């Protein structure tokens, strides 16, 4: 996986298309998690730079599975895929002596207990925010995060959330790929927070 290391060191976009839970459990540092599901074209189109070389980490390296991801990207005009690898890349990465990363998952109770020390970043849309949000949170919709990353404080640990956990997983990977290590994800998102009867503002 020397090639993967050199691609990441050069700042290339390596998109890990595995499920958010798999990425959270173990991933190659610097890769961006955009799970290959029905929202994949939306977020790839919003976040991935056009006219850039792209590399994929896919769940399965059968020709059909790779083609499906590549075709999904082509449909939105992202035609820069230059290579791909499968999940065995993580095993090889570790065998080369590199550590794998994981994403800390905070429960509602853990976030509530640490609320005073954590910056909370809400990556939902404005309409969702207006309907209810965590007190003191910062709103940066996921589609705007790449441009607004410097609005996320660097001097305190950060908890990211969306409605249910899908968008925040992508947001966490973007922040971590930019070198931000003290970043956690709120498991279950705003929905879990509200269902637990925790304070919300409107």
Image (cartoon, rainbow, N blue to C red):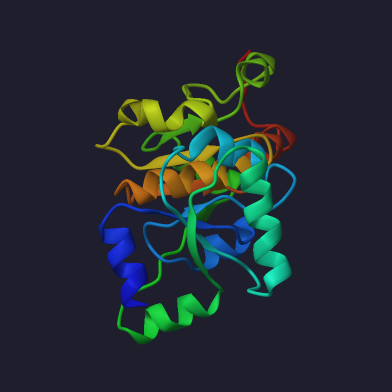
Depicted 96 relative to depicted 35: above or below = below
Q: Confirm whether residue 169 shows in the render.
A: yes
Q: Quadrant of the N terminus?
A: bottom left
Q: Is 196 left, or right, of 89 in this rendering?
A: right
Depicted 132 relative to depicted 37: above or below = above
56 or 201: nearer the eye? 56
50 or 149: nearer the eye? 50
Q: Residue at x 62, y 60 (%)?
A: 21
Residue 5 image-quadrant placement: bottom left
Q: Confirm whether residue 165 shows in the render.
A: no
Please provide percent x and percent y for residue 72.
68, 48
Q: Is 91 left, or right, of 194 in this rendering?
A: left
Q: Is 53 left, or right, of 87 in this rendering?
A: left
Please provide percent x and percent y for residue 127.
67, 16
97 or 62: nearer the eye? 62
Please provide percent x and percent y for residue 181.
33, 52
């Amino acid at each position: 996986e020397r090639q993967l290391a050199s691609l990441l060191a050069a700042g290339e976009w390596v998109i890990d298309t595995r499920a958010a839970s798999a990425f959270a459990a173990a991933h190659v540092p610097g890769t961006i998690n955009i799970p290959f599901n029905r929202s994949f074209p939306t977020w790839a189109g919003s976040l991935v730079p056009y006219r850039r070389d792209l590399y994929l980490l896919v769940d399965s390296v059968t020709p059909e599975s790779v083609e499906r991801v590549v075709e999904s990207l082509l449909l939105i005009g992202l035609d820069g895929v230059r290579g791909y690898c499968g999940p065995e890349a993580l095993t090889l990465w570790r065998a080369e002596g590199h550590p794998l990363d994981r994403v800390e998952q905070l429960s509602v109770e853990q976030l509530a207990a640490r609320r005073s020390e954590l910056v909370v970043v809400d990556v939902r849309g404005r309409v969702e925010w207006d309907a209810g949000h965590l007190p003191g949170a910062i709103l940066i919709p996921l589609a705007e995060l790449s441009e607004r990353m410097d609005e996320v404080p660097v001097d305190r640990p950060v908890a990211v959330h969306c409605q249910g956990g899908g968008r925040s997983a992508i947001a966490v990977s973007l922040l971590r790929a930019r070198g931000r290590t003290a970043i956690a994800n709120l498991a279950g998102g705003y929905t879990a927070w509200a269902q637990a009867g925790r304070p919300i503002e409107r």
